[in-house]
């Protein structure tokens, strides 16, 4: 078989290295060696081997008579004629192996000579320490598991940023830091599940394709279901379905969910992202703030053994209690916005235009204030801060404040200059909710593609009766960024969205 003809990639401008690899692969096949067998079964992983042997000296290792079977990718090799050292890497780490002609048959030793950096092999042997003290596997058996036909970068630094995200599989091979980030992400999700389950929250799943997108003001992605002859939307949030479960009698629910918003891409935004949403009956937004403090400090203690994290060179204390600040006061004191901006839509519009902040003529007053907050206040909130009292006209699902109906019992959490969570006491009055939906519909008609749709079934659910409740959404990707000191959201999403290759 001519591997160059079979390759999906156009190899018309093959480098000498690629041509050499393909020639080797064809020679191996001609010799009857399967390039992609499925026979070898490892008995342990490199991390488990290290955990068992790392603390033992050379004499102690000699007493271990077990033969270990490891599978991994060759990521380095040093040839010495009739022997060779090579580095074997799997998902959990790297270990050195040693192959000598006197320990294996000639075909096996010759096979190793035909292998390249990036090939996956299976190795069996005992462990020992070299004269320099390095833990090493003495190979008595070696076989090819998968032949790598394209070369790896010589060093991680040879990968540019776009290649790192576009070919994450190569990034994971070359960069231990990348692997550590995604191992940490998995652990963070497991800890969140444990934290909530220990507090009697039930994990549920709600639809990702919805006939009416709701739960957040965001522009949705559209699709179409042929059998039902129905337009559907990828969900922007699971909120309205989770609150239907409160109506149904579940009192504490949560979902770790994928959401989709048809918006821009940046270091903080990806159109497909992960959210944690949780809802509790017979609770208010203050309870959610307390629970959030508790959860974040729990995560920090479990991961770092402390309540302080360092993010992009800044020390951030997650020790409770966290600061709490009124939305309007933050605009005045931190954002230095003039007082008339808070009282008058016209003044807010004029001020926004004066600082070249894009604003449509139909923009509601609350949305102008929110955009001003994003620019003037949010970047300055480094230590954990709850901002409370958001305007009602930008909080269509939140309960009005009993003290001031123009604002809601809502908060947003900010850490390291970005929003981390949004929560509120839930609006369970069906008549007020209908009026809020209708106002959103009018905003949509005026050109706001992020405004909510009318959801009659949700109104019907509220008519059945939803208990007083509070809920919250936490951006998991941003939380992982914080806890892994990652500067871009693309660093914590395995396969971030990118422009098509040209």
Image (cartoon, helix red, strand yellow):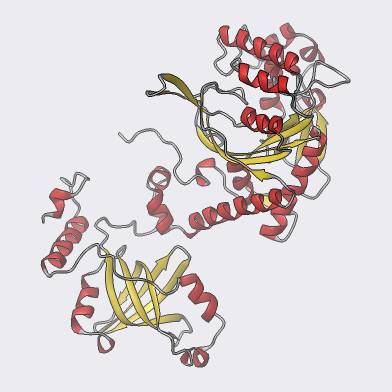
Location of residue 463 in the rendering, given as x and y in whole percent from the top left corner: 72, 19
Location of residue 287 in the rendering, given as x and y in whole percent from the top left corner: 81, 38
- Residue closest to the eye, 50 or 417: 50
Q: Residue at x 69, y 9 (%)?
A: 350
Asked if 319 appears above or below 335 in the picture, the reply is below
Q: Which picture quadrant has residue 474?
A: top right
Location of residue 490 in the rendering, given as x and y in whole percent from the top left corner: 50, 42
Q: Residue at x 72, y 32 (%)?
A: 423
The quadrant in which the N terminus is found is bottom left
Asked if 94 appears above or below 154 in the picture, the reply is below
Q: Which picture quadrant has residue 184?
A: bottom right
Q: Is residue 114 left or right of residue 435?
A: left
Question: Is residue 357 in sight in this rendering?
Answer: no
Asked if 222 appears above or below 478 in the picture, the reply is above
Asked if 420 appears above or below 91 in the picture, the reply is above
The quadrant in which the C terminus is found is top left
Q: Residue at x 64, y 50 (%)?
A: 193
Q: Is residue 24 left or right of residue 387?
A: left
């Amino acid at each position: 078989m001519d591997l160059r003809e079979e390759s999906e990639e156009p190899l018309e401008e093959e480098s000498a290295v690629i041509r050499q690899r393909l020639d080797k692969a064809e020679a191996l096949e001609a010799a009857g060696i399967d390039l992609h067998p499925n026979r070898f079964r490892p008995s342990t992983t490199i991390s488990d081997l290290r955990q068992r042997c790392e603390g033992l000296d050379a004499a102690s290792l000699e007493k271990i008579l077990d033969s270990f079977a490891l599978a991994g990718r060759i990521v380095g090799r040093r040839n010495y004629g009739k022997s060779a050292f090579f580095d074997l890497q799997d998902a959990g780490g790297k270990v050195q192996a040693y192959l000598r002609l006197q320990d294996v048959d000639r075909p096996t030793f010759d096979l190793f000579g035909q292998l390249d950096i990036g090939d996956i092999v299976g190795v069996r042997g005992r462990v020992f320490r070299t004269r320099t003290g390095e833990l090493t596997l003495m190979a008595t058996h070696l076989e090819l598991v998968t032949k790598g036909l394209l070369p790896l970068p010589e060093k991680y630094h040879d990968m540019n940023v776009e290649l790192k995200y576009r070919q994450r599989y190569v990034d994971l091979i070359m960069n231990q830091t990348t692997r550590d980030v995604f191992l940490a992400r998995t652990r963070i999700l497991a800890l969140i599940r444990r934290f909530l389950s220990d507090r009697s929250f039930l994990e549920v799943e709600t639809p990702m394709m919805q006939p009416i997108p709701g739960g957040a003001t965001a522009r949705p992605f559209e699709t179409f279901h042929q059998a039902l002859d129905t337009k559907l939307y990828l969900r922007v949030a699971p909120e309205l379905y989770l609150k239907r479960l409160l109506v149904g009698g579940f009192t504490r629910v949560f979902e770790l969910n994928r959401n989709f918003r048809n918006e821009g891409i940046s270091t903080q935004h990806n159109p497909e992202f992960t959210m944690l949403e949780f809802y509790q009956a017979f609770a208010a937004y203050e309870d959610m703030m307390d629970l959030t403090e508790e959860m974040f400090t729990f995560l920090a203690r479990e991961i770092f053994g402390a309540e302080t994290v360092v993010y992009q060179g800044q020390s951030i204390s997650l020790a409770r209690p966290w600061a709490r600040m009124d939305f309007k006061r933050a605009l005045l004191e931190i954002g230095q916005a003039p007082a008339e901006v808070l009282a008058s839509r016209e003044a807010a519009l004029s001020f926004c235009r004066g600082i070249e902040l894009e604003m449509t003529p139909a923009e509601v007053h609350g949305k102008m204030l929110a955009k001003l907050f994003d620019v003037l206040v949010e970047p300055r909130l480094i230590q954990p801060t709850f901002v409370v009292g958001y305007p009602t006209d930008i909080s269509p699902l939140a309960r009005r404040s009993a003290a001031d109906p123009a604002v809601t019992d809502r908060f947003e959490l900010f850490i390291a200059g970005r929003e981390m969570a949004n929560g509120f006491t839930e609006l369970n009055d069906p008549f007020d909710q209908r009026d809020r939906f209708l106002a959103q519909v009018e905003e949509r008609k005026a050109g706001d593609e992020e405004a909510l749709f009318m959801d009659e079934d949700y109104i019907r659910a509220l008519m059945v009766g939803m208990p007083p409740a509070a809920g919250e959404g936490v951006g998991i990707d941003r939380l992982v960024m914080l806890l892994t000191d990652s500067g871009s959201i693309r660093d914590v999403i395995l396969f971030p969205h990118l422009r098509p290759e040209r």
